[in-house]
Amino acid sequence: MILADSISKSFLSDKKSLSFAQERLWTLEQIQPGLIIYHIPLLLHAQGRCDLSVLRSAVEILFVRHSALRATFHTENELPYQVIQELQIDKIFSICQADVDTFKQKIQTEMERTFQLDTGPLAYVRVYQLSADEHFILFQMHHIVTDGWSTRIILDELWELYASLLSKQSSDLPPVGLSYFDFAELQRKQYEDDLK
């Protein structure tokens, strides 16, 4: 199993370029911080048995696979850059026992919670356990680290990882090829080449 310990320290400390889409979102955040319109909340209702320790492991592997989910955003000489943070599973995954009323209050609070681009996390999972056989799983992300297309991939991979860990089988997920940071670098290089 891939764990956070396998991530190289140099990769974590490198300052990485933003894509043009990320730079637009970063600029909008500087103009008007804390807007919840850039949140991408996914609320899933799980009825029946849910192995929460397996789900936690699946989330951990997912966040290792997709380092963009661990990005934070900073500035140097008024220019933005992003840094990949070490995975701290307790900051991105939590379980809360709740009755229906408490659950509704907590979800409302989460929907209004603002992200801090410089400290993160900018993606996290909260599990609300209403009973042994009923859970709501909130996957909350800021749009600067994901988009609609990526979100579908992330969810598909989460369930694939959960199912494979639950059945003690190896996952059929292919290795992650081009990262989003690679894409951002290529996008900027192509833009610079076009200007020549």
Image: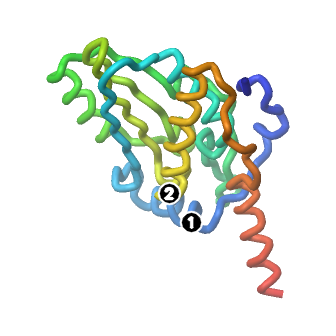
In the rendered image, which quarter is residue 187 located in?
Answer: bottom right
Give residue 93's position: percent from left, percent from top: 49, 24
Q: Quadrant of the C terminus?
A: bottom right
Residue 134 located left or right of residue 5: left
**Residue occupying image coordinates x 37% and y 34%:** 138
Label 1, on which residue?
21
Q: Quadrant of the N terminus?
A: top right
Disc 1 marks a residue whose amino acid type is Ala
Residue 152 located left or right of residue 161: left
**Residue occupying image coordinates x 54% and y 54%:** 150
Q: Secondary structure at mark 1?
A: helix
Q: Is residue 175 above or below residue 80?
A: above
Q: What is the distance, in whole Å, between disc 2 and disc 1 at their CAs?
A: 10 Å
**Residue occupying image coordinates x 69% and y 28%:** 170
Please count the marks in the image.
Answer: 2
Residue 144 located left or right of residue 130: right
Residue 121 located left or right of residue 31: right
Give residue 164's position: percent from left, percent from top: 60, 28
Label 2, on which residue?
147
Mark 2 and mark 1 in contact? Answer it, CB < 8 Å: yes
Question: Residue 93 versus residue 23: which sits nearer the camera?
Answer: 93
